[in-house]
Amino acid sequence: MVALGFGFLITNYGFNWRYLFWFGMIIATIGTVARTNLREAQEFANAKLRLKTFFDNHFIDRKILKGDPILEEKVQKKTVFYYFLIQCAGPVPTYFVYFYCGNILRNSFGYGIGDIIYHNFLISIIQLFTTLLLAYLSYRIYPLKIIKVRWVIFSTFIIFCPYFLYRVSTPIHLFIIQLLIVLFAPDSAPASAIFYKYFPIFKRFTYSSIVYALAHAIISIVTSFGFIYCTKYMGQIGILCIMLPIVISYGFGIFYFVKLENMTVINSY
């Protein structure tokens, strides 16, 4: 959103783009200060190192930890796989809303770069408030229920999306389509914490980070090229070649973790 906001100011009001670097420096400074002062994050990231330091300072042989069920807990391959499927969903709606629809604005309605940036800037503001709303709702409603409802609505809408795109006659029509995608796009939020707890404590950060990075890297490449060629030869229906597999895979991932949650509840009794 911030990048689009600066882009809008630069292209429409001659805002000096060099100020963007100063703004980035301020954000980086704030992030660095926050990172160094958040004790929980530091302790979590250095859990193994802190444990090693404690044993060394108290002259305790670390070999006594060998075979410890917590330290040696293995990562379930199914958990990694289904978490990967969930993370694969994120880049697809983003590409569709900001890049694919941007091309429609340019080719069908003669929008210039500045107009497209302003249009997408408005969408990004709505996306920000959607994220805040989801964070608030997660206090009231179980997060997995929220993303299941969003998945059902998004899945239903995306099936008819090619028809709506063929019927688009004004930028407002396209704006509404983008708005619906942003509101109900499949994502791990606000249930990320639920997914993390099924990774071993001492391997949680490593596996969740690697899976996130791999999923976004792979799907970003597949999406950027897939949308181009699928829509080139199949028209607007071609978006389903990318969207439907992602939506279905995301559903499998969600219901896997729902199953794990149900099993946890049953075992707690």
Image (cartoon, rainbow, N blue to C red):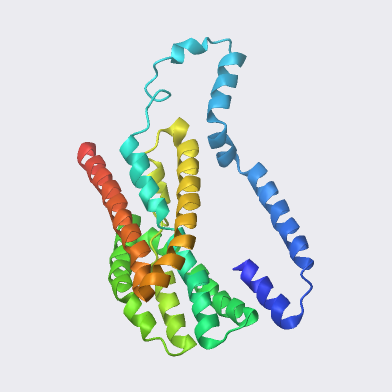
Quadrant placement of the C terminus: top left
Residue 112, percent across and down? 62, 82
Residue 107, percent across and down? 52, 82
Look at 38% across and 69% down and name the residue there: 239
Residue 179's place in the image compared with 198, above or below, is below
Q: Tell which of 14 and 107 is nearer to you.
A: 107
Residue 142, visible in the rendered structure:
no
Look at 70% across and 78% down and name the residue there: 11
Quadrant placement of the N terminus: bottom right
Q: For this view, does 257 lie left or right of residue 197?
A: left
Q: For this view, does 86 lie left or right of residue 207?
A: left
Looking at the image, the residue that sits furthest to the bottom is 169
Looking at the image, the residue that sits furthest to the front is 233
Look at 31% across and 39% down and name the residue there: 78
Q: For this view, does 266 lie left or right of residue 69?
A: left
Residue 135's place in the image compared with 120, above or below, is above
Residue 24's place in the image compared with 211, above or below, is below
Q: Quadrant of residue 70?
A: top left
Residue 214, visible in the rendered structure:
yes
Look at 34% across and 40% down and name the residue there: 79
Q: Quadrant of residue 243?
A: bottom left
